[in-house]
Image: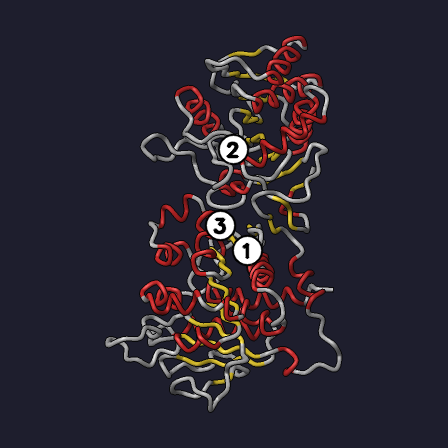
Amino acid sequence: MIEVLHQAGRFPLFSSEGCRALEAASLARSPAQALMARAGLAVARLALAVAPHARRVWIACGPGNNGGDGLVAARHLASLGLEVHVSHLCGSKPLPADAQWAWRTAMDAGLRIGSTLQPPEGCELVIDALLGLGLQRAPEAALEQAILAINACDVPVLSIDLPSGLQADAGRPCPDALGRAGAVVRAQHTLCLLGLKPGLFTGQGRDHAGRIWFDDLGVSAADGDCGRLVALGERQRWQALARRTHASHKGSYGQVLVIGGAAHMEGAALLAAGSALAAGAGKVHLKPLSGAVHAGGRPELMRWPEGPLDSQTPWQDLTLVVGCGAGHGLDAGPATGSGSPLPEVLRQAPRLVLDADGLNSVARSGATRELLHARRSAGRQTILTPHPLEAARLLAWPVAQVQADRLVAARALSATLDCSVVLKGSGSVIASPGEPLHVNGSGNAALAGAGTGDVLAGWLGGLWAQRPDLPPHEIATMGVAWHGEAAQGAQAPLRAADLIERMHALQACLP
C-alpha cells in the first residue's frame, strides 16, 4: 500500500470499464472471494494507520461489492477489539456472490448489522463503503441520506475505492436525471483498490478524496486504458535529460522569444520571460506588444527590436512563447491593423508555447486556426496551455462541458488542433496526438492566482529551448509537474513572481 502522490513515477490509470476488465481477469486467476478478502484487510489496516486511537467506528455499507469490502474490514476491526457499528443498505436486488460471502462471514463472527443511517454516539472514524465505480447516476433516497449523514460527521472519513457519489472517470458528482450534481462523500482518506481511477486526481476528485492511498491487491498492471498519473520524480527526470557539462556556455541552452504584453498587461509577458530565464534558457528575448515593457528587475532579459517580425533579426530557430497578456494585439483585421505577428509565428516557429490571448486569437479566427492545425504535419511542434474557459472557446463548448469530463475535453482539443495540450486546473491534463494522457498530481490551490499560468508558459519555453529535441508531450509533462511541485507546502496564495523563485530554487535540490 502506498500514498500514491508521495511516490515517484507515472502510474497507470484505468477507466471504469478498464477497472472492470482488470477485476474480471484477476477473479479468473484467483480463488473465490480472495480479492475481496485482500481488499477488506487492506481497508482495516489503513483504518488503523490513519486513526490509531479510534475505538468506535461506523461503517456504512452499500448493496454491492464495495459494501462487501466494508463488511470484511468490519470483521477484522472487531476482531481487534474495536467497537464496530455497521449500517448496511441492502437494496432491492440480491447481493453479488462475494458480497453475500462477506455478509455471512461477518454474521458468523458475531457482528451486528443494522440499517440505521446515523453514526453511533462517540464515533471516532467513519468508513464509507457505500458505492463503487459503477455509479453513473446521482445516489437516490437512502444512499443519498447515508452520504449526507457521513458528511455531517465531524470525524475522519475513509472511503473505499472512491468517495461515494464521485464519478470514477471524470472526477465530478454523478448527475441526476435533470443534470444536477448529486451528493458526494467528502473524505479525508481514500483507499483506491486494484487500479487507479482518473476521477480521483482531476476535476473535483482531490477535494472529495483527501489523501489518496493505493493497493493493487497483488495484481500488477503495466499500462492502463486511460493514461498515466504523473506523481513525483519529474524534476529528476529532467535532470537526467539535461545535464550541464563543464564546458557548456549560454549558447548551449537555447533562446526563447516571448511575444505578449499589450498595454496595461505588460506584467504577463514579463512573468513569462522571467520564468523562461529561471528555467535555464541561455538567452531570453522579450517583444512587448505595448512597446513599453521594462526589464522588471531582471536586467538579463533582452529587448527584441520593435516593429514586425522579419528576416533582418532571425527568430525562426528560437523557441517562442506567445500570447501572455496580449489582449487583442495578436488579432489581424481592421480593428487592430494587419500587423499581427501570430500568422507568421504559426507558419515558421519550430517550437511554440501558445497561451492566454494567443489561444483566444485562434478561437476568434478560422484562418489562424487552420495555420495552427497545419503545424504538426509540417514538422513544427506546439504546446497549448488553456484554462477551462480558453479551452471552451477553442472547442465551442460550454465551460461546464469541459469541466464535466476534463480528459475527454483535453483529448478533443488535442485531436481538433493536432498539437499538445495542457488543460490547466486541478489535475492538469496533458494530451498529445498518439500519446497516452497524463494527469498531473502536483499542485494545489496556492496556484489559483493571477499570472501563475504565464509562469507555466514561460517555464515550458525555457525547458524546451534547452532540449529542443524532446517531444512536446514530455516537455509539457515535466514542466507542469515542476510548476505544481513548487506550490507544495504553500500556506497562502502564491504571487506569480514568487512562484518563479520557488521553481528556480527547486533546481538547487537536484542531485
Badge 1 is on which residue?
490
Q: Quadrant of the C terminus?
A: bottom right
The answer to which of 59 and 283 lies nearer the viewer is: 283
Q: Amino acid at mark 1?
A: Ala
Q: Amino acid at mark 2?
A: Pro
Q: Quadrant of the N terminus?
A: top right
* C-alpha distance separating marks 3 and 1: 16 Å
Q: Amino acid at mark 3?
A: Ser
Q: Position of residue 311 (x, y in %)?
A: 46, 88
Q: Residue at x 47, y 85 (%)?
A: 303
Q: First in sequence: mark 2 or mark 1?
A: 2
Q: Residue at x 63, y 83 (%)?
A: 251
Q: Residue at x 31, y 65 (%)?
A: 364
The answer to which of 221 and 415 lies nearer the viewer is: 415
Badge 3 is on which residue?
426
Identify the element where label 3 is drawn.
Answer: loop
Verify CB contact (< 8 Å) between mark 2 and mark 1. Answer: no
Q: Measured along the vertical axis of the image, is residue 55 above or below residue 487?
A: above
Q: Position of residue 195 (x, y in %)?
A: 62, 37
